[in-house]
Image: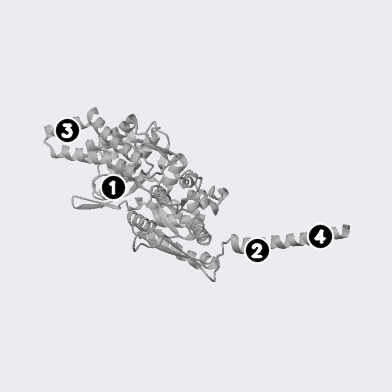
Amino acid sequence: MFKRKGKGKHIMATVAVLMAAMTAMMTGCGKEDYGLDKKDPQTITIWNYYNGAQAVAFERLVDEFNNTVGAEKGILVIAESKNSVSELYQALEDAVSRKAGAEELPDIFQTYLDNAVALDENDILVDLGKYIDKEEQAEYVDSYVQEGYFGGDDAWKLFPVAKSTEVMILNKTDWDLFAAGAGNVSVEDLATVEGLAAVAEKYYEWSGGKSFFGRDAFANYMFAGSAQLGIEVYTVENGQVTLNFDKDVTRKLWDNYYVPYVKGYFKHVGKYRSDDVTLGEIIAQVCSTSSASYFPTEVTRDGDSYPIEHLVLPVPGFAEGKGYIVQQGACMAVTKSTKRREYASVVFLRWLTETDRNLEFALSSGYLPVKKEANDIQKLQDYQVQSGHEMEALQMDIITCAFEELQKNTPYTTAGFQGADSLRSLLGDAMISQAMADREEILAASPLEAEQLLERDLGDAHFEEWYASVKLQLEDICSR
């Protein structure tokens, strides 16, 4: 009896070992790599909207992947630029709705949170947490990861590849002339929103009526400024949108942008503020780190051109405000398909955001790396030395300033919901368009009429009327 029982145990143990071995083989050859085979490569497609240097940098990385890790694992990446955000989203909408003649959905696509939320209504986004555990997610900047969790189902749907924030850049050449001539201004005065407005007034008076400042992405001023002042414009919880368009907070935003604008201290002329700096319309701007490299090296004013130097500074915040700074930049989403294709997509995204590679993309494109380890000046400098990829002085100053801003402040981005894009568009236009229209009216009027118009514009009634109108429009968006 004893021997027979032992023999049975031996047989069962042998079977267990064999089963364990088979499981290990299945894990190694099936489940772990989901059937990837370099003899039969899995093709994955990526839609993006990169252009110029960003497109060149991205395509170079795609080629590198295909020739190395992709060839080894059996993954072939095909990247296609749709040229612009609007064209990309139109192609995605056509694919989702299966419009006649539409292309099939790509395996990966570039997207902002607002559009991802809208597309997710069709249940097309992969929960990346199935392939990347919390421990690995923790290697990425926390706020970048958190942005990808939405919808209330604890699914991670957006993968951060490259991000950006904002910086302030001065035409240092003309600033130095102003600082020396005025005698009572310094760079430190530009640390706050209130200080910026005060300096702009001094510049206007010193220069004989020239404007000092302008900013790109006006919605960022409204959203981040409101958060700094303690009240977010809106919040989203369990899919429910709550509008918090506070009158006192909005008035402070108004007083520090609309008022300086109608007085002539701030100005918007071209499509971007770098255009205005180039034409000598302003000497200071706030812009995205990913577009800051367009800051000019010379100014052409009244037919005369002269070279200028730059000075990169942190974006001014409200003096009594909280330390928030804008977090922006699209993420990548993976569409639901087969486990093999989904996994292959994740393999590429992981590879793309490895520290040195992410630094390479940052150096080439002006975006910020997304891994915590890579967001370090010393790491960036070491990589430049090792790779021989020397960053231009302006780009280095931009990245250095951005890293310092992110260390001292909390990155801020708005929550996503179906109408978020419309709400952002409204807030990005409402105040600045009012300011531009009112300023134009003042400039076209006689001196007496201009004085009366300015008195009207600076009055409480004008703000109240504008505020009430905008609030109604925001309420309509949030209630849809």
* Foreground label between 4 and 3: 4
Q: Nearer the viewer, residue 438 or 77?
A: 77
Given the image, on which type of amino acid does mark 4 rest? Gly
Nearest the camera: 192 or 297?
A: 192
Distance, label 3 to label 2, CA atoms, is 80 Å
The percent position of residue 372, horizontal first and vertical second, equals: 51, 48
Is disc 2 placed on a helix, strand or loop?
helix
Give the label on residue 273, or none.
Answer: 1
State how far apart marks 1 and 3 are (Cα): 26 Å
Sequence-first disc among 2 and 4 = 4
* Secondary structure beneath label 3: helix
Relative to the observer, which residue lies in front, 168 or 361?
Answer: 361
Res 453 label: 3
Q: Is residue 76 rendered to the left or right of residue 393?
A: right
In the image, which disc is placed on residue 8? 4
Instruction: Report the residue marked by disc 2.
Output: 25
Residue 217 occupies quadrant: top left
- The amino acid sitting under disc 1 is Arg
